[in-house]
Image (cartoon, helix red, strand yellow):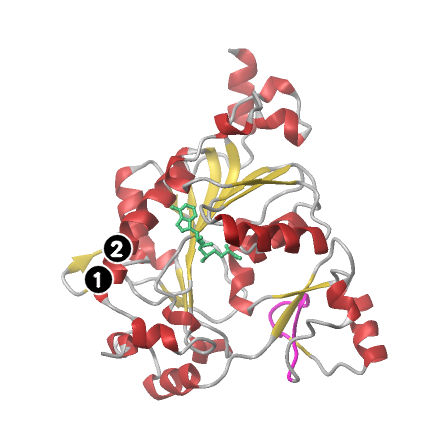
Amino acid sequence: MNPLDRYERLVDDVEAFRDACDRPLPSVVRVNELRATPERVRAAFAEEGVTYEQVDWNDRLFRLPDGSPGTSWPYVHGWLHGQEEVSALPALALDPDPGDRVWDACAAPGSKTCHLADLMDNSGVLIGNDNNLGRLSALRHNAERLGVSNLVVTNDDARNFTTDNLGVDSLDGVAGRSPAASRTQFDGAVADVPCSCEGTCRKNPDVLEKWSMGHVKGLVGIQKGVLRRAIDLTRPGGDVVYSTCTFAPEENEAVVDHAIRTTDAEMVEWDAPLETAPGITEWEDQTFDESLQKAHRVYPHQNDTGGFFVAKLRVGGAESDATGDADETTEVEA
Ligand SMILES: C[S@@+](CC[C@H](N)C(=O)[O-])C[C@H]1O[C@@H](n2cnc3c(N)ncnc32)[C@H](O)[C@@H]1O
């Protein structure tokens, strides 16, 4: 069975969806602002004769019609990171501030971790965790090339992750914050969970041949556990971004629906910078919370990208104080 058949009733244009899924994926790079600016990269491309196209929804992303620049000097020197367009969405959705404490639960090989560090301006503390030691060496290599210096790498099952294993009393000390606000909680987290990867079919057509509902069901328990842990470790008012590169509602809306029914986290609006479809509220015999419409589905034909799903949740409820200031005041008074 081709799993894409399942989604024909969800998309606005079935033919365009199927055509896009059959086309190869454009090669894209993100400008790493820890080392360069879009202007400097444009100048380097002109000097090196690299043909590029600015991605219309983000001036830090360039399409390279002639393929990856893996050996070019701007790449080797960490000005660029080869990263699918939609892979930029989780860090943009979390939108961390410099100085924040951020957990990337499933981080390897590090595209989103390094993007988070870039948005945090290499300040605060960023914990990049993955349970696969082999993949963590790719994360370390990427972080070094891109000049990331606020990263602590951990190798744990995200479902049981605890900051106790870091050997620090408080993340605040590591993040250079006042000890008055000390607590081992994160300001934000990204749960970019392992998934059935249907949305990567443009670069790995094998994923569709190997697809099985048994595999999807096996992943759901891990996905729920990782998202739950990210919510538990994030302070009230902090945000958690859940993402996958698959279309399967069992791994997307159903997982987020379970989280909002079993915790105090709620879906929040996030204006995605590219064309998306809203999350769905019904699938086969399941009904999901109406707020799941605030999630974003990205189908390949909409922006000529891979497929993706992203949902943004706020711990303590959608109306809770996103700055965390109220929380800190309470702790100081206590
Ligand atoms: C979609 S990939 C992450 C990609 C990464 N965020 C990036 O942008 O480069 C999912 C990752 O989850 C990791 N993983 C799978 N199960 C895990 C678990 N229980 N705890 C932590 N990481 C896990 C896999 O090793 C894999 O690296």
Is residue 272 among what the camera can see? yes
Foreground of the two, 8 or 24: 24
Residue 68 x/y as whole percent: 65, 76
In the displayed structure, does residue 285 sit left or right of residue 199?
A: left
Beta carbon of the mark 1 residue lies under 8 A of ligand 1: no
Q: Is residue 59 magenta?
A: yes
Q: Is residue 142 magenta?
A: no
Question: How would you rate the neighbour count of disc 1 (Cα within 10 Å): few for under 14, some for 14-19, many for 20 or more?
Answer: few
Residue 299 x/y as whole percent: 41, 74
Q: Residue furthest right?
A: 47
Residue 6 x/y as whole percent: 24, 75
Which label was assigned to residue 218?
2
> Under tag 1, what secondary structure?
helix
Residue interval drawn in magenta: 55-65
Q: What residue sits 49% from the left and 25% below the top?
A: 164
> Under tag 2, what secondary structure?
helix
The quadrant in which the N terminus is found is: bottom left
Instruction: Identify the residue under disc 1.
Output: 214
Q: Is residue 84 above or below residue 244?
A: below
Mark 1 touches mark 2? (CB < 8 Å): yes
Residue 132 x/y as whole percent: 46, 49
The Cα atoms of the two marked residues, 1 and 2, are separated by: 6 Å
Q: Residue furthest front?
A: 134
Q: What residue sits 31% from the left and 44% below the top?
A: 259
Circle count:
2
